Image (tube, rainbow, N blue to C red):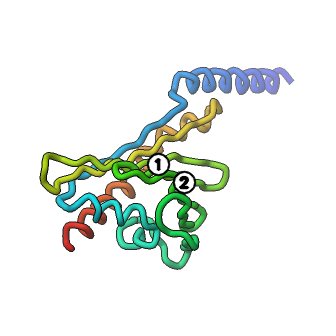
């Protein structure tokens, strides 16, 4: 009985320590990647703002598990790939805002387009903001978010660059 009591107290104490440490971690995670592209802004924007064109550059596109909404350009357009629904929330000349919903989790994404000098050089920045709850398992899982999402973001941006520069 004494061993069981000591075990339960140890488990509760360990949980409290882990929770206290997790409270030191931020509750908002920002993940961002950018690429320089030598192409007109309209060409880049057209490929991001049109969900039907995502199959040409989005690294996680799976044609067998994809559904595109009837409206596929601009705000309100959405695409479902596997279990994730991506919806364009707002579309301005220099910024396209998206919402990524997977189960009960929502990520806010943005594509920012910056003109460089007077030529056709632009920088495309893809940015995600993730809000996590205070739960220790969510806080610690958020540490891995950058490592999990970055390869797909970088591959997608490279694909977008190749697509618009080779036209």
Q: Residue at x 71, y 27 (%)?
A: 11
Q: Please report contact status of discs 1 and 2: CB closer than 8 Å, yes or no.
A: yes
Q: Residue at x 40, y 45 (%)?
A: 127
User: Where is residue 138, by image quadrant?
Assistant: top right
User: Where is residue 156, by image quadrant?
Assistant: bottom left
**Does residue 151 lie above or below 164 as drawn?**
above
Q: Specify the quadrant that holds the N terminus.
A: top right
Circle 2 — which element? strand
User: Where is residue 163, by image quadrant?
Assistant: bottom left
Q: Mark 2 or mark 1, which is nearer the start of the sequence?
A: 2
Q: Nearest the camera: 137 or 57?
A: 57
Q: Residue 154's spot in the image, x, y percent?
A: 32, 55
Q: Residue 162's spot in the image, x, y percent?
A: 24, 67
Circle 1 — which element? strand
- Structural distance between the alpha carbons of marks 1 and 2: 7 Å
Q: Residue at x 67, y 50 (%)?
A: 104
Q: Residue at x 81, y 27 (%)?
A: 4
Q: Which residue is the site of mark 1?
A: 109
Which numbered dot is residue 100?
A: 2
Q: Nearest the camera: 142 or 157?
A: 157
Count of marks placed on residues: 2
């Amino acid at each position: 009985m004494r061993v069981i009591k000591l075990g339960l107290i140890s488990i509760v104490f360990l949980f409290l320590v882990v929770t206290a440490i997790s409270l030191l971690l931020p509750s908002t995670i920002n993940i961002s990647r950018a690429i320089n592209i030598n192409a007109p802004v309209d060409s880049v924007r057209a490929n991001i703002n049109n969900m039907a064109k995502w199959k040409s550059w989005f690294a996680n596109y799976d044609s067998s598990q994809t559904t595109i909404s009837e409206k596929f350009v601009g705000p309100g357009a959405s695409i479902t790939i596997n279990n994730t629904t991506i919806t364009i929330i707002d579309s301005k000349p220099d910024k396209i805002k998206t919402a990524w919903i997977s189960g009960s989790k929502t990520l806010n994404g943005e594509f920012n387009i910056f003109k460089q000098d007077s030529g056709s050089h632009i920088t495309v920045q893809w940015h995600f903001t993730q809000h996590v709850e205070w739960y220790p398992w969510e806080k610690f899982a958020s540490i891995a978010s950058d490592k999990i999402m970055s390869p797909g973001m970088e591959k997608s941006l490279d694909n977008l660059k190749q697509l618009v520069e080779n036209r």
